[in-house]
Image (tube, rainbow, N blue to C red):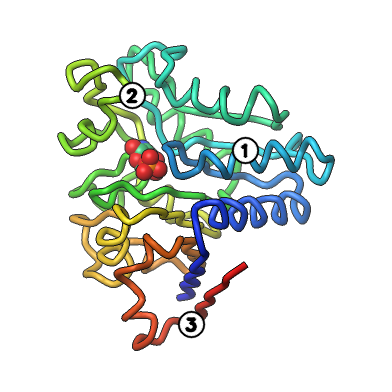
Amino acid sequence: MAMEIVILPDYDAVAREAARRVVALALQKPHAVLALPTGKTPLRFYNLLINYTKLGLVTFENITIFNLDEFLDLPKNHPSSYFNYMQKHLLTCVKVGRHYIPNSEAADPEEECKRYEDLIAQAGSIDLAVLGLGLNGHIGFNEPGTPFESRTHVATLTHQTREGLASEFGGLEYTPTRAITMGIKTIMNAKNIILMATGAEKAKILERALFGPITPDTPASVLQLHPSLTVLVDHQAASSISAYLKTQDISKKVSRDC
Ligand code: GLP
């Protein structure tokens, strides 16, 4: 098991390191398959990917992207849909080979989950999954209690998750209650995983995820079992794990002040 924890000075440095690794993969493997997140954490990361392609350093023209999740019961073009997020923050500026995201308007969500999982299987394995971390430990929308064996499925969003998203939807009553998410097993099948966490509010949950018990109560804790996990964190998010880094034997750990 290899867990690499890279502690970086700030949000921008985390984004740069994540983007650097994605660019390195795209250069090494132009037909790579990526799983990518949404949320606030990866915004700068996407911005950097756009910059790198504009500079001509890399192309994503043959890359396949699967988004981790999408809301349900929401028009595809709703300003807060993840379809719209990806268009706005990456896809209108960067040409990618193929982009897949669950259909937020699916009439038969269970069928849509099956279709999405089949598409992932047809693409071969995911080379790299880039993840954010929910305040309750969710990855994608795999909320606490989700079995580690889960594949792409319909998730019921927790009250805490919906409250966190409410401002984007103009209030809790307008915030979706369901989503389609890539399952934990689907994510764990990725060859490599990068987990990004930034800001003080992620410190406690990051500690639980990386050093707490491996349990569905903390979905991200499953990542402790992944053979190739890189955790990119800023100093604030790392504030609760520094003690572990001094005492525990982690196969590789790096602290950079670039
Ligand atoms: C969201 C998404 C996740 C994301 C996480 C953290 O609700 N479903 O994919 O990683 O919660 O979001 P943020 O980066 O805004 O903290």
Decide if ligand 1 comes within 8 Å of the CB at mark 2.
Answer: no
- Disc 1 to disc 3, C-alpha distance: 31 Å
Q: Quadrant of the C terminus?
A: bottom right
Residue at mark 1 = 47
Percent x, y of residue 190: 51, 54
- Disc 1 to disc 2, C-alpha distance: 20 Å
Q: What's the residue type where badge 1 is placed?
A: Asn
Q: What's the residue type where badge 3 is placed?
A: Ser
Residue at mark 2 = 168
Look at the numbered disc 2 and give the secondary structure of its residue.
helix
Residue at the spot x=27%, y=48% of the render? 135
Look at the numbered disc 1 and give the secondary structure of its residue.
helix
Q: What's the residue type where badge 2 is placed?
A: Glu
Residue 197 image-quadrant placement? bottom left
Badge 2: few (under 14), some or many (20 or more) residues near its Cα, within 10 Å?
A: some
Percent x, y of residue 225: 38, 68
> Quadrant location of ligand 1?
top left
Residue at the spot x=52%, y=38% of the render? 43
Please say if 250 is above or below 201.
below
Q: Quadrant of the N terminus?
A: bottom left
Badge 1: few (under 14), some or many (20 or more) residues near its Cα, within 10 Å?
A: some
Disc on the earlier residue, 1 or 2: 1
Select label 1 or label 3 by which is in front.
1
Look at the numbered disc 3 and give the secondary structure of its residue.
loop
Q: Is residue 242 left or right of residue 147?
A: right
Q: Is residue 156 visible?
A: no
Select label 2 or label 3 by which is in front.
2
Find out whether the residues at labels 2 and 3 contact each other: C-beta distance under 8 Å.
no
Please say if 224 is above or below 37.
below
Residue at mark 3 = 251
Residue at the spot x=54%, y=59% of the render? 192
